[in-house]
Image: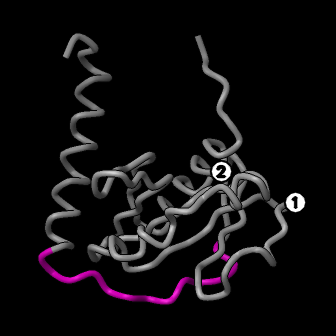
Amino acid sequence: MTLELQPGQRLARGVSRHFSTHGFVSIEEFVPARGLRVDVMGLGPKGELWVVECKSSRADYQADSKWQGYLEWCDRFFWAVDTDFPTDLLPEQTGLIIADAYDAEIVRMAPEDKVAPARRKKMIQKFATDAARRLQVLRDPRL
């Protein structure tokens, strides 16, 4: 049985595929802190932490009131949208990725605001733990 991906999930898949071509690993629907859930967290080869919020429509973007809370958990913050999205809605001080279900392109690099070393260590450990748990559940669904 194959599940049909929702529009935001298709964008996230394209972003994750693109990140992998740059040596990044990623995890979708990552919770950096209670009350926050980012669509994609990317971990780069030098320990970079990038957050990507995937928006499939104007209404989806306008309903997002938490995105500024994600900034303290990453070095760079991006929006990922498809080619039909009205990109003039998105804040210019954030990164922009155009994506589909198969790939993506960074069209505006996000400014860098480095996470403090202690928070970076905590986030990388949480990233690894969450990824390992997800893999373990795939291998042993009874867990």
Residue closer to the observer: 51 or 14: 51
79 w.r.t. 142: above or below: below
Q: What quarter of the picture does the N terminus occupy? A: top right
Q: Residue at x 20, y 54 (%)?
A: 126
Q: Main secondary structure of the magenta part?
A: loop
Q: Which residues are magenta?
A: 106-118
Q: Residues within 10 Å of mark 2 (few under 14, many from 20)?
A: many
Say what amino acid the circle numbered 1 marks.
Asp
User: What residue sits right under mark 1 in the picture?
Assistant: 84
- Whole-percent x, y for residue 23 in the image: 41, 66
Q: What quarter of the picture does the C terminus occupy? A: top left
Q: Secondary structure at mark 2?
A: helix
- Whole-percent x, y for residue 70 in the image: 42, 68
Q: Which quadrant holds residue 105?
A: bottom right
Q: Which quadrant holds residue 85?
A: bottom right
User: What residue sits right under mark 2 in the picture?
Assistant: 11
Q: Residue at x 72, y 65 (%)?
A: 98
Residue closer to the observer: 59 or 120: 59
- Whole-percent x, y for residue 107 in the image: 69, 78
Q: Residue at x 28, y 77 (%)?
A: 46
Q: Residue at x 81, y 78 (%)?
A: 88
Task: Please state if 17 lies on the left or on the right of 125 as rendered.
Answer: right
Q: Secondary structure at mark 1?
A: loop
Rounded to the nearest whole Å, what is the CA distance between mark 2 and mark 1?
13 Å
Task: Please state if 140 lies on the left or on the right of 65 as rendered.
Answer: left
- Whole-percent x, y for residue 53 in the image: 56, 60
